[in-house]
Image (spheres, rainbow, N blue to C red):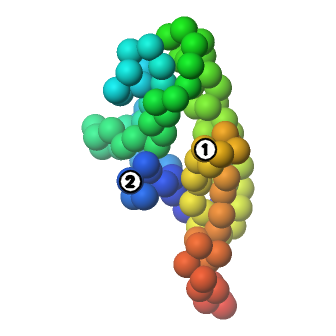
Amino acid sequence: MGEVWIRTLGNGLVRADYVTEISSTRGSLHEDQGYSLKVIVDGKGHVLIDDSDLQGSLADRLEYARHVEDALLLAMDEAREIDAAVVISYEPERERWSAAPVSVLTGRLPESV
């Protein structure tokens, strides 16, 4: 099993193993639309998604956000099964999480053993 990293909204990376909580809230700028999703690592929040365009009632938006949280947990579990270091990123245009080996993202091949 390789390391699993999660890309933040600001293109930072956090180790999935260090995540202690995943939380969703209403959109940070708008009361009547959007949602945000963050992970907590060492007591600090790291925003992964800040979607200010999602319409609907607060309950509908938070239900959608919970669905996205569940999908993140599934992506983390699947990534842990890969032998290489992996980065999980949210693809807003496809509304899904994707995982890519670090070697693909950096263009460097892993060293042979």
Element on which disc 1 rests: loop
Give whichever of 94, 2 is nearer the camera.
94
User: Is 6 situated above or below 23?
Assistant: below
The residue that appears at 44% across and 14% down in the rendered structure is 32
Query: Which quadrant is home to the N terminus?
Result: bottom right
Find disc 1 in the rendering and name its residue: 92
User: Is 107 situated above or below 41?
Assistant: below
Q: Is residue 54 left or right of residue 24?
A: right
Q: Is residue 17 left or right of residue 81?
A: left
The residue that appears at 46% across and 30% down in the rendered structure is 52
Q: CA distance from mark 1 to mark 2?
A: 14 Å
Which numbered circle lies on residue 10?
Answer: 2
Amino acid at pointer 2: Gly
Q: Is residue 15 left or right of residue 106?
A: left
The residue that appears at 66% across and 57% down in the rendered structure is 99
Which numbered circle lies on residue 102?
Answer: none
Query: Dot 2: few (<14), some (14–19), or many (≥20) neighbours within 10 Å?
Result: few
